[in-house]
């Protein structure tokens, strides 16, 4: 099928970050807990800053669950600064824009991603998560990361002199480092260990159905074919729910996420195999094109959506030996497509702060972590809040507020076009 080929994407001049060279007097031994997108990003950022990294991952194999992921220009910039542009381009689809539809299929507004990309000097990219994850893993290993699987971290203790932290693993072993970075996701153990008490994430009342369609099936239907031939990000917004979809792998796959009220049982796992019939029933009165797409679906997973609006008093242990990053600190609703983007930005900033270290003293590490948090806290808290705002705005029932929303979306579209 026709698609935006990697070569046809605008060419940007990436500013690639050189690797800092340092001797043992200032080289930190670091542990990154978690090999998700944030943890691997942290490994790359810290390695480029000239330090040593061991990544500890609880799973028995390195990989990424879920289907598609949107990478907006802010995080694409970070990836390019890590020298990943050439490795990523073959896997990237560049959507030309975004469309907003009402739940019955009426067009509300559009966004011109190409214009934004030009203005921001960085692309919009959509990936299959496994491809993005593999590129990050390869780069981390190339830069010198040691990756250990089957390594679930349960807790940490700071040494008496306050210069190092030892992580305690579920398998009974331990490991000590000058700095530990908790990138262990929304259910972070490191976060709870830092706080010294349980701290479950906050439920949002929504869940996500996530599925992938084979685009060959869609190409056979004249009503669905345009979604493949002209790759864009499409949103249908309506009462208590919305649907997002976009093309992956240059037209091979079609990613769909459907966001609906959370009906998952309390106390159970946050990811379950979903019922395709139940999902279809929720959208039976929506735009018939959604019904057609869901008619092609064979299986679906459902994910409870939780958030972490803030972490007080700080993101780091007072000794400067432990800090957090990504969903462990500021998990957000995916309604701005920015959770992983924020984790990658965190990793970029943490790396730049650690690149400035000239010694391994507690004072130097504390200063670096203070600057890291100062750079990241306000922005990430705003993204979490804005994600929750979008939940309200996208899920309005038909009526006065919905009409005002649609009018504002249209006006925004017109201003952009000017
Ligand atoms: P995770 O990806 O959760 O990684 C944590 C890692 O740590 C895992 O590998 C885990 O196995 C490991 N781990 C956990 N506990 C331990 C432990 N105790 N010891 C050792 N290892 C451990 N973001 C975007 O930017 N764009 C999007 O389009 C987008 N779409 C989304 C759609 C949906 C439906 C959802 C739910 C999220 C979406 N996100 C998106 C958000 C994004 O997926 C997350 O923000 C991102 O994956 C967080 O990365 P992370 O590395 O912080 O955590």
Image: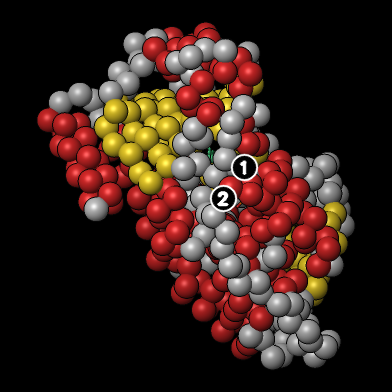
Q: Nearer the viewer, residue 212 or 197?
A: 212
Asked whether the beta carbons under mark 2 and mark 1 sit within 8 Å of each other, the answer is yes
Q: Is mark 1 within 8 Å of ligand 1?
A: no
Label 2 belongs to which residue?
Answer: 9
User: Viewed as shown, does residue 280 lie left or right of 411?
Assistant: right
Q: Is residue 325 visible?
A: no
Quadrant for residue 1, please give it. top right
Residue drawn at x 57%, y 71% is: 349
Residue drawn at x 22%, y 40% is: 410
Colouring scheme applied when the structure was drawn? secondary structure
Seen in the picture, residue 271 relative to 295 is either above or below; the reply is: below
Image mark count: 2
Q: Nearer the viewer, residue 68 or 12?
A: 12
Structural distance between the alpha carbons of marks 2 and 1 = 7 Å
Q: Secondary structure at mark 1?
A: loop
Return the x and y of residue 304 as percentages of the image width and height. 51, 32
Residue drawn at x 63%, y 47% is: 6
Label 1 belongs to which residue?
Answer: 5
Q: Nearer the viewer, residue 121 or 376?
A: 121
Residue drawn at x 56%, y 17% is: 218
Q: Is residue 204 visible?
A: yes
Q: Residues within 10 Å of mark 2 (few under 14, many from 20)?
A: some
Return the x and y of residue 29 as percentages of the image width and height. 79, 75
Seen in the picture, residue 269 relative to 176 is either above or below; the reply is: above
User: Viewed as shown, does residue 395 lie left or right of 368?
Assistant: left
Quadrant for residue 204, please give it. top left
């Amino acid at each position: 099928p026709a698609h935006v080929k990697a070569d046809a994407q605008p060419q940007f001049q990436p500013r690639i970050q050189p690797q800092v060279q340092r001797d043992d007097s200032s080289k930190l031994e670091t542990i990154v807990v978690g090999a998700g997108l944030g943890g691997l990003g942290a490994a790359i950022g810290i390695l480029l800053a000239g330090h040593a990294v061991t990544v500890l991952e609880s799973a028995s194999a390195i990989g990424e669950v879920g289907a598609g992921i949107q990478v907006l220009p802010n995080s694409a910039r970070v990836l390019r600064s890590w020298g990943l542009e050439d490795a990523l381009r073959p896997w990237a689809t560049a959507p030309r824009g975004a469309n907003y539809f009402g739940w019955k299929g009426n067009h509300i507004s559009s966004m011109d991603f190409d214009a934004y990309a030009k203005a921001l000097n960085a692309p919009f990219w959509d990936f299959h998560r496994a491809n993005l994850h593999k590129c990050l893993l390869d780069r981390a290993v190339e830069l010198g990361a040691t990756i250990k699987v089957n390594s679930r971290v349960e807790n940490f203790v700071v040494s008496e002199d306050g210069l190092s932290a030892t992580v305690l693993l579920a398998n009974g072993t331990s490991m000590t480092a000058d700095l530990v970075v908790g990138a262990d996701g929304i259910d972070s153990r490191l976060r709870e260990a830092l706080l010294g008490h349980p701290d479950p994430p906050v439920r949002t009342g929504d869940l996500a159905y996530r599925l992938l369609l084979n685009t060959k099936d869609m190409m056979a239907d004249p009503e669905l074919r345009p979604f493949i031939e002209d790759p864009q990000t499409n949103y249908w917004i309506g009462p208590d729910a919305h649907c997002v979809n976009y093309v992956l792998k240059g037209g091979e796959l079609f990613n769909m996420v459907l966001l609906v009220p959370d009906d998952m049982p309390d106390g159970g796992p946050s990811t379950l195999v979903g019922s395709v019939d139940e999902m279809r029933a929720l959208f039976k009165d929506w735009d018939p094109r959604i019904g057609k797409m869901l008619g092609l679906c064979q299986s679906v997973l459902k994910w409870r959506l939780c958030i972490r609006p803030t972490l007080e008093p700080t993101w780091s242990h007072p000794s400067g030996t432990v800090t957090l990053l990504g969903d462990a600190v500021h998990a957000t609703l995916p309604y701005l497509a920015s959770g992983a983007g924020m984790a990658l930005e965190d990793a970029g900033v943490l790396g730049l702060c650690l690149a400035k270290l000239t010694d391994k003293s507690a004072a130097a590490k504390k200063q670096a972590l203070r600057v890291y948090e100062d750079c990241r806290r306000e922005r990430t808290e705003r993204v979490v809040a804005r994600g929750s705002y979008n939940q309200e705005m996208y899920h309005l029932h038909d009526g006065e507020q919905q009409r005002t929303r649609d009018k504002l979306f249209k006006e925004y579209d017109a201003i952009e076009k000017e």
